[in-house]
Image (cartoon, rainbow, N blue to C red):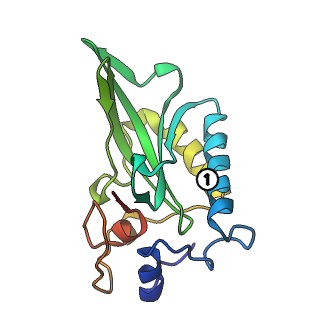
Amino acid sequence: MRRLPDSDELKDIVRNAIIGDYWPPYLQDEDEIEAHIHSTVDKLKNCGLLDVDADFNSYGSGFASYVHVFCTKANRAATKRSGETDWINGITVYLGRLVPFAAFGTEERTRHARGGSAGFLDPSSLETTPDDSWNTELKTILETINAAGYTVLPKSDYCRELPIRMNWETNFGTDTYFDAIFYWYD
């Protein structure tokens, strides 16, 4: 298991710097890591159990230190229709761009004729699934991302308060390891 970043590494992470000691030697620059993330997402898409939607564009603006990957059951099995709106349950995975850490938790999305909505993970939603019927899908997700070299730290590690005070532009603002590793800004 990988260790949590130390104070100097945290400072580098919040400056959008890749922490090379965490990545394998063949993944040492932004393009290689991005290709690796695409490959990992493709493996999730090809497993047969999941429909997968990944946002590689940092939510359309700014920078995200991770790729947001929404996984729902294949064939709309986790989609419920209410009126004109689809309610879609799933598991979101954050795949780190700067360190090979991942996190997961429940997300519910909506889709309708005018658009839809999506959510974000936060420390309180980590390690959750929509219900117990997701055990097979979660096992597949975790096996796939672990095989790709990602470490899913326990929620207790992600929720630890940072050892130093840092100022960085982020939309979460929790002063936890989770926020320092998985952040985005406009």
Q: Is residue 131 left or right of residue 98?
A: left
Q: Is residue 112 left or right of residue 103?
A: left
Say above or below: 75 vs 139.
Answer: above
Image quadrant assignment for residue 129: top left
Q: x, y percentage for residue 158? A: 38, 68
Image quadrant assignment for residue 161: bottom left
Q: What is the secondary structure assignment of the residue under circle 1? A: helix
Q: x, y percentage for residue 152? A: 50, 61
Q: Residue furthest top?
A: 83
Q: Which residue is mark 1?
A: 37
Residue beneath the point at 44% across and 51% down: 58
Q: Amino acid at mark 1?
A: Ile
Q: x, y percentage for residue 74? A: 53, 25
Residue beneath the point at 41% across and 74% down: 14
Which quadrant is home to the N terminus?
A: bottom right
Tag count: 1
Q: Please tell me which residue lies in front, 186 or 5.
A: 186
Q: x, y percentage for residue 35? A: 67, 53
Q: Is residue 117 left or right of residue 154?
A: left
Residue beneath the point at 59% across and 42% down: 140
Say above or below: 55 vs 147.
Answer: above
Q: Is residue 132 left or right of residue 142?
A: left
Say above or below: 101 vs 160.
Answer: above
Which quadrant is home to the C terminus?
A: bottom left
Residue beneath the point at 34% across and 19% down: 80
Q: Residues within 10 Å of mark 1 (few under 14, many from 20)?
A: many
